[in-house]
Amino acid sequence: MISEWLAGLQYRLGATIDTAGHIVPDTSWSARLQGSDRLWMLIEGTHVLSLMLFAGTILFVDLRLLGAVLRSVPVSRVAGSLLPWTVAGFLVTVTTGSALFFSDPLEYFHNFAFRLKALFLLGAAVNIFWFHFRVQANRPQWDGAEVPPRAARISAATSLAVWFAVIVAGRYMAYDWVKCMNPGALVSEIAQCSTYDATLAEIDAETAQ
Ligand code: HEM
């Protein structure tokens, strides 16, 4: 069902329909963004730059929580001065990421690396909630500690690991072997390539040849 909805987004939204009621290929908004000379690259470049801002500022907060850098500066000061940059970077990364996704929604939904990336993003979100609502609850007691307590260090190490995994999975999304083009058994299973093929067949029948 999700697959069919995304196919509608990719092939039908904004597309020209000919007199026989068929979709004219490559006329949808997604196809135009995908085929654009510069816009797609501009968005991807912005995605990468903003994720560097976002991941770079997170790195320093996590290293402080691990007691590895800026040990004499209270955690709240390090986090407080970097957080606005983290939030700004995150918003731009998510917005540009969503725009890139919109350029090829069905393909990305059935992309093994995209699914891993979504899973790691979910893991990062769970870790953020755990940190904010549990670990941070007694922060005044350890704010100035050179090495924060174990729970804070575990959360920081988890954050570093999952964000690293999100970046690696994001990088792998571009390779053909993670897509349903010519998938191995594991990729085919996890990316649900049989559903992808069935959805494409439906769209093919609606498209002008
Ligand atoms: C918030 C943290 C995120 C990080 C750290 C991240 C990381 C990355 C990285 C490293 C790349 C590869 C860039 C390159 O090598 O040129 C990438 C590309 C991409 N990302 Fe993200 N991303 C994030 C969020 C998102 C979100 C929320 C979405 C979609 C809803 C998304 C969709 C995409 C797409 C579609 C690509 C293009 C893949 C391709 O080359 O075909 N990203 N991302």
Image: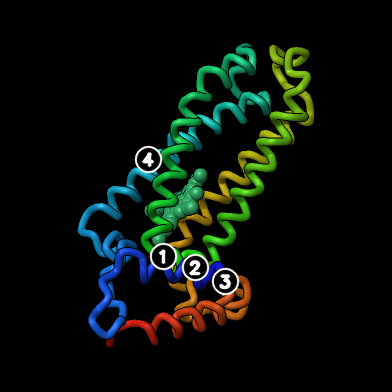
In the image, residue 8 sits, relative to residue 117, either above or below, namely below
Q: Amino acid at mark 2?
A: Trp
Classify the position of the N terminus by image quarter.
bottom right
Direction from residue 193 to residue 52 in the image, left or right:
left
On residue 5, the disc is 2
Pick whichever of labels 1 and 4 is earlier in the sequence.
1
For the residues labelled 2 and 4, the Cα–Cα distance comes to 31 Å
Mark 1 sits on what residue? 9
Direction from residue 144 to residue 187 in the image, left or right:
left
Q: Amino acid at mark 4?
A: Leu
- Please report the residue visible at 31 percent of the width from the left and 64 percent of the height from the top: 14
Residue 34, position as x, y percentages in the image: 30, 62
Q: From the image, state whether disc 1 or disc 4 is nearer to you.
A: 1
For the residues labelled 4 and 3, the Cα–Cα distance comes to 34 Å
For label 4, the SS is: helix
For label 2, the SS is: helix
Whether label 1 touches label 2, CB < 8 Å: yes
On residue 1, the disc is 3
